[in-house]
Image (cartoon, rainbow, N blue to C red):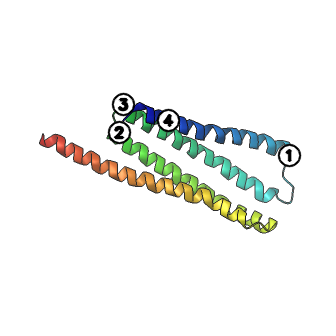
Amino acid sequence: MKQGSTLFLKVVLFCMGIPVLAICVAGAVQLVRNPADPEYAPLLYPAVVLIYITVIPFIMALVQSFSLLGLIDRQEAFSDRSVTILKKIKRYALSVSVLYVAALPFVFMMADKDDAPGLIILGLVPIFASLVIAVFAAVLQKLLREAIFIKSENDLTV
């Protein structure tokens, strides 16, 4: 595989991580400067804390994706390390989904208080997106494991 395509993917991963971190810093500063209305604070602050916690597995998944692209660059894509990295990505994606599910009751209460049903749909989007990533990583992990097994069998017969 050409290194240009993996370089592009590495740049995309970097461009996905930097805005998330910037929004987290800017959002924290804004929340400290402009505290929430006391009526909404019991709903807003727990949800914000859970959302901030999801940044950790998200960034860790990006780091693992970056290392997987490094393995592809070094022609080591069909290795046990790649399978392990995909397993970690799957776990990180599932943890992001679980954390957003934990924040969903606060989103429901906020949507009910503001009479904003669209907020519920916005709360569901990251759950389903991270579940899709987890399933995709699980499928790739299984395919890669089978490919490594077939490769090892071919190496034994040659």
Q: Earlier in the sequence, mark 3 or mark 1?
A: 1
Q: Earlier in the sequence, mark 1 or mark 2?
A: 1
Q: Position of residue 150 (x, y in %)?
A: 23, 48
The residue carrying pointer 1 sits among few (fewer than 14), some (14 to 19) or many (20 or more) residues within 10 Å by Cα, namely: few
For label 4, the residue is 8
Q: Earlier in the sequence, mark 3 or mark 4?
A: 4
Query: Label 4 to label 2, Cα distance in Å?
Result: 17 Å
Query: Label 3 to label 1, Cα distance in Å?
Result: 49 Å
Give residue 111's quadrant in the image: bottom right
Q: Amino acid at mark 4?
A: Phe
Foreground of the two, 4 or 13: 4
Foreground of the two, 8 or 10: 8
* Residue found 32% across the figure and 41% down from its top: 78
For label 1, the residue is 34
Q: Position of residue 30 (x, y in %)?
A: 80, 43
The label number, if any, that marks residue 74 in the structure image: 3
Q: Earlier in the sequence, mark 4 or mark 2?
A: 4
Residue 28 shown left or right of residue 72 in the figure: right
